[in-house]
Image: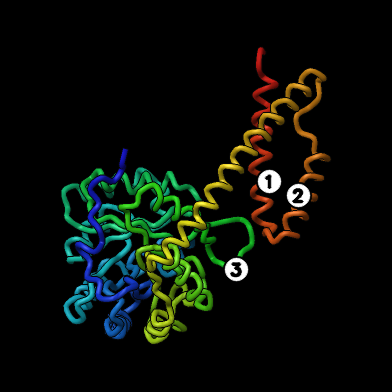
């Protein structure tokens, strides 16, 4: 069953002049001059059709800059009147929503810290009941697609048809070059499950610094995401929040002009060759599945043998040897170590589960 049966396509309500569609603006609205100066420069970029600015900032420490609040809404109204750009702000509670609506904000967005709380999402959904407005929902801090979908679903059930998911990366314990790990497999899975749901990518929050913005933005487009949300500030070095990840409007213009917009479909010759290669993949996948099925049958036989001889399931020496041998073999033929480790870990988890089920039979 389709969870989002009535989502409106972005093209039906957003003024897209030329791809890619871009939302841009400072992390935080700091002053009327800063907001208007930034907006005037961004309005000169054809791909930028929406101006973003944070007014209520959910900071970790109360001594940090927590935004200008309600008075910034008047500045955004001036941005819209002067430049024609649509405006969007982050909301975290019903009061924020009501104030944004009363000042003519076009798009609301719900941040990662709010998305994780179903109570907050429900309260926001209830105040939006019957309101014709667009809402963007960022992914939660942790890589949990169900929480993300749940927040989107609550809003849609409240009647929000102009709904967009925003991928801003996930908090992750492993060291990576990014502020938030992209974990592209999660937004890809969201698009697979709900192809009617637009998904934007926020490279600023993924990267945490401007030097990484271009490759992340390009990958987002290569993965057929529907647009970008990028933080831009007229004077990033003076920004009160997240100065490292904001770029100037001029640099944003150069970044956008450097992006390659790829075609979704090619020539007849291209499509025929692609179909030929995909057929080979299909055959190999069938072989892989057959091999995995036979492997798991042997795993169950091993489980029975262990049970008959009262031997433990987990044998770390054997597992360590498998990891070492299989990874070395795979790396020699061009497979990445990270991929092999993930694959072997998945196989090992399934094998342990199968053997556990065998051990527990007739008990």
Would you call the spot at circle 1 few (<14 residues within 10 Å), some (14-19), or many (20 or more)? some
Residue 300 position (above or below residue 129): above
Taking the spot 54% from the left edge, 66% from the top edge, the residue there is 179
**Inter-mark Cα distance, 1 to 3:** 25 Å
Would you call the spot at circle 3 few (<14 residues within 10 Å), some (14-19), or many (20 or more)? few
Q: Is tag 2's residue or tag 3's residue first in the polypeptide sequence? A: 3
Residue 308 occupies which quadrant of the picture? top right
* Nearest-to-viewer mark from 1 and 2: 2
**Inter-mark Cα distance, 1 to 2:** 8 Å
Residue 320 position, x and y percent, is: 80, 45
Residue 345 position (above or below residue 163): above
Callout 2: SS: helix
Residue 177 position, x and y percent, is: 60, 68
Label pair 1/2, CB-CB below 8 angstroms: yes
Q: Which residue is mark 3?
A: 177
Q: Is residue 183 left or right of residue 360?
A: left
Tell me the tag on residue 53: none
Q: Is residue 202 visible?
A: no
Q: Which residue is mark 1?
A: 344
Q: Which residue is mark 2?
A: 326
Label pair 1/3, CB-CB below 8 angstroms: no
Taking the spot 61% from the left edge, 56% from the top edge, the residue there is 173
Residue 290 position (above or below residue 65): above
Given residues 167 and 53, the one toward you in this image is 167
Callout 3: SS: loop
Residue 154 position, x and y percent, is: 30, 44
For the N terminus, the quadrant is top left
Q: Is tag 1's residue or tag 3's residue first in the polypeptide sequence? A: 3
């Amino acid at each position: 069953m389709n969870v989002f049966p009535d989502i409106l396509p972005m093209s039906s309500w957003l003024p897209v002049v030329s791809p890619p569609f871009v939302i841009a603006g400072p992390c935080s609205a700091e002053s009327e001059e800063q907001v208007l100066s930034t907006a005037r420069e961004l309005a000169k970029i054809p791909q930028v059709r929406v101006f973003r600015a944070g007014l209520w900032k959910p900071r970790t420490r109360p001594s940090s800059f927590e935004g200008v609040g309600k008075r910034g809404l008047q500045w955004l109204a001036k941005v819209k009147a002067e430049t024609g750009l649509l405006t969007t702000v982050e909301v975290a509670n019903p009061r924020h929503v009501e104030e944004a609506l009363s000042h003519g904000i076009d798009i609301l967005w719900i941040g990662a810290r709010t998305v994780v709380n179903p109570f907050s999402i429900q309260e926001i959904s209830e105040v939006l009941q019957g309101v014709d407005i667009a809402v963007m929902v960022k992914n939660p801090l942790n890589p949990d697609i169900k929480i993300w979908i749940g927040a989107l679903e609550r809003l849609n059930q409240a009647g929000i048809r102009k709904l967009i998911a925003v991928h801003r990366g996930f908090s992750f314990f492993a060291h990576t070059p990014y502020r938030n790990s992209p974990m592209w497999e999660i937004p890809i899975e969201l698009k697979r499950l709900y192809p009617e749901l637009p998904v934007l990518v926020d490279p600023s929050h993924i990267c945490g610094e401007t030097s990484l913005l271009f490759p992340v933005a390009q990958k987002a487009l290569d993965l057929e995401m529907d647009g970008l949300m990028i933080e831009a500030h007229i004077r990033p070095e003076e920004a009160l929040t997240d100065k490292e990840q904001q770029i100037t409007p001029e640099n944003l213009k150069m970044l956008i002009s450097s992006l390659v917009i790829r075609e979704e479909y090619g020539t007849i010759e291209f499509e025929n060759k692609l179909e030929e290669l995909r057929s080979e993949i299909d055959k190999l996948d069938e072989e892989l599945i057959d091999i995995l099925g036979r492997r798991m049958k042997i795993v169950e036989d091993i489980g029975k043998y262990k049970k008959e001889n009262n031997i433990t399931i987990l044998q770390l020496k054997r597992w360590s040897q498998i990891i070492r041998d299989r990874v070395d073999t795979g790396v020699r033929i061009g497979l990445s170590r990270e991929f092999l480790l993930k694959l072997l870990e998945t196989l090992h988890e399934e094998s342990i589960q199968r053997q556990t089920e065998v051990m527990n039979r007739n008990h």
